Amino acid sequence: MESNKRNLINASVGLLKGFLQKKLENEFEQSLNDQLEQIKLQIFDGKGSKKLDDALTDIKVFQKKSQQVSSRYIEEVVKNISGFSNGGNVNVPRGLIATIEVKDWSSLQLVETDDIENQLLLDEYISTCTSDLSDVLYALRHRVGFLMSVKELKASENPFGPAVLLNTFTDLMSTELFSKKGFEIINRSFSQAVLSNLGDVLKEVNELFIKANIMPKLPKHKIANHGSLNIKDTQSLTHADTKSSMIGQTQMPEIQGGHVGVASLTSMGIDPVIYADLIKMAQLHRSLQGENFVSDGLTVSGSQLPTTKLIEVLTSLQKEGAREEVDLSESVRLQVGEKIQVDGQRQPYAEQDDTLIDVVAMFFDVILQDRQLPDTVRAMIAQLQIPILKVAMIDKDFFAKKSHPARQFLNAMSQAGLGVSGNNQQIKSSIFEKMEELVMRVLMEFDNDVGIFVGLCDELGVFMEQQQRQVDLLEERSRKATKSSEQLELTKRQAAYEIALRINGKSIPEFVQIFLDETWKDVLVLALLRKEREPQESQQCIDVIDRLVVSVVEPVDYEAKELIINSLARLLKDIKVGLENISCDFHQSATFFKELESWHKQLLAMGQGEPSDVASVEKVVMVELNEEMYASLEEDLLQELESKKAQMPNDKFSKLASKIDVGDWVEYTGEDGGVLRAKLSWKSSVTMQCLFVNDCGVKAMDISLDDLAEAFRQKRMTIIGQERAPLVDRVLAGMKSLMTSKSAEPGLA
């Protein structure tokens, strides 16, 4: 057995080693060469910077030792797998910072911001690869854990997984004194070469394990999305008034420790006021179902089935559901009946148990209609119907207290999943995977200790806090990039405005106007962008415009002409300095200077007896700009904004787009047909541009207000809004609202 195990590991290592050697020698090197050429091209085009220069040097240095690094890397990977197979622990590389293990985020103040941002990029590469290869990674992780007798091998510890493979490379790179840009380029090239092609070799390794009969029983991995149940009159339940979220106000005594033993059930009851509402809800649920209401179809006879026995049956069904696909269309009542029947007969349920079965069924029917949650998240939470039914039977405070741990857990799951785009399996997020994990643990571990929800809720809270810090960092980066892009456009507008303001109403040669609009505007834009660091530079650029315009307009008298002549040398020098600031090729502007010199000679009559270049003068085209201009650029932009708003159709979709708030979520269809969600992160008050980010904080789209309204109008996008009330409060309010609306109908209690 031991020799077979060793042979299997050796064969798997051989496959992985061959794959890594091929990718590192070919695709990795080619990717680095491509990056090198791109940087050289940017520098050649005059777009260079110190960061690019440093990165260029880093890549050249790395390429000289790349074969040595590749060999050391493969040795570390093989050593890690071999050590693990011999009974040791996985040597989990830590990467730049141990983000997964961070408990006290204040300690990150000691970590360089560049390290945090680079680690986030690495995490993104790992997350993308993990999502793309979720099935094979899941199967392989369990088979490796089974072979090594590891009870639960974490994804981050799988020696064949992307986390270990990438962080092993990062650990080797950590000793190199590369710049942030160089580090980013090298790691991106490595990820593109290795992680993006990892699936093929992992499938081969997985096949080896299958052929070796390493076939553990895998826990359920995927959560089926069966959509929403077709329940009459419940489409808008969750949008009802959420002010009253409890079914009655009387509260039960506090349960010490959050744990209620099954043995104590007989001594506890639901508050009469609350129970009266629950009975009405159970009756309403049966009435709403009508012909669709599914009873178990069994003959009821004999003594009453004890609640403790019913909970044992529910626990059995719950754990079976964890191992198999859950059919959300099959009622719990029917499942229980099939489990306890004997020759088509079953014992009667206690009245409270019978009521709670239907109330909890209605509770989850309403959850499946909650459009604030993505379909996959609703389907995932719906798998908790049996556990929540057990909670309601064990702890009668579930419907009475907002602070109940099971309610808090449901609320936390809802809040965490609000922005998850789980339908698109290609971008399956770590949040969605964490939610899947917690649901699985409830199904597998919850027997009768309600306190389990306290621990799971706390764990989800810590996880979400860590995730939120990363999301906030990425979202801030997305906002800065979008704001910078808008600022650049506004700066270009300001530069154009300053030029137009100074030539408006003046007749000047066309070549001067072209030079100002096409070349000097770039000089002024750069100066305006540097205004905080170099406050005098922008004014100097504007002064050049004034002096240039004065120099090409016929002087009013002899003194004006002399003043122009005396200032020409300084004017030409300042123009050349400005062009050097934008790395403008002097040869490209040589024609302008030649034409300007010729024009100055003719206009200023440089002395008696000098030859006159009349032919040159006749070729010069004069232009005159006469436009009505606003007193300031701000006023100009404001009028433009009002004009755009006035052009938008006066309908509900335009109003909806105008009123959307930062933090609101929208749902739309992606290019691949998957349903995606994005949150409004920033809304410009100047250009009407809206920045939306996904649940990871990464830019999803940049769209104008009128295009957003049109997307609503064409039903390509719908607004979800924000979670303004906890899930359980919304659901109970919806149930009460439905109960109230139906109370006047005959036949309803």
Image (cartoon, grey):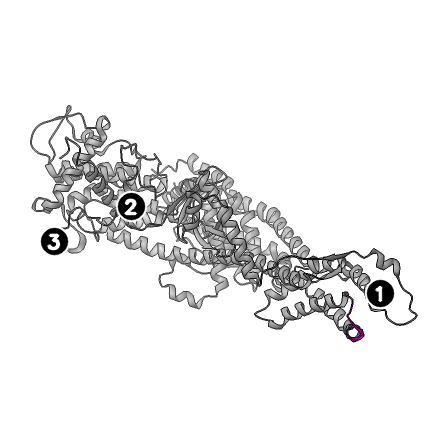
Q: Which mark is residue 253?
A: 3
Q: Is residue 42 above or below residue 215?
A: below
Q: CA distance from mark 3 to mark 1?
A: 101 Å
Q: CA distance from mark 2 to mark 1?
A: 89 Å
Of the residues shown, which amino acid type is indicated by label 2?
Answer: Arg
Q: CA distance from mark 3 to mark 2?
A: 28 Å
Q: Which residue is mark 2?
A: 441
Q: Which mark is residue 602?
A: 1
Quarter where residue 339 is shown: top left
State which region is magenta. Answer: 554-562
Q: Could you tell me which secondary element the residue under label 3 belongs to? A: loop
Residue 611 position in % (x across, y down): 91, 66
Q: Is residue 393 left or right of residue 50?
A: left
Q: Residue at x 55, y 51 (%)?
A: 190
Between discs 2 and 1, the one toward the N terminus? 2
Q: Is residue 716 visible?
A: no
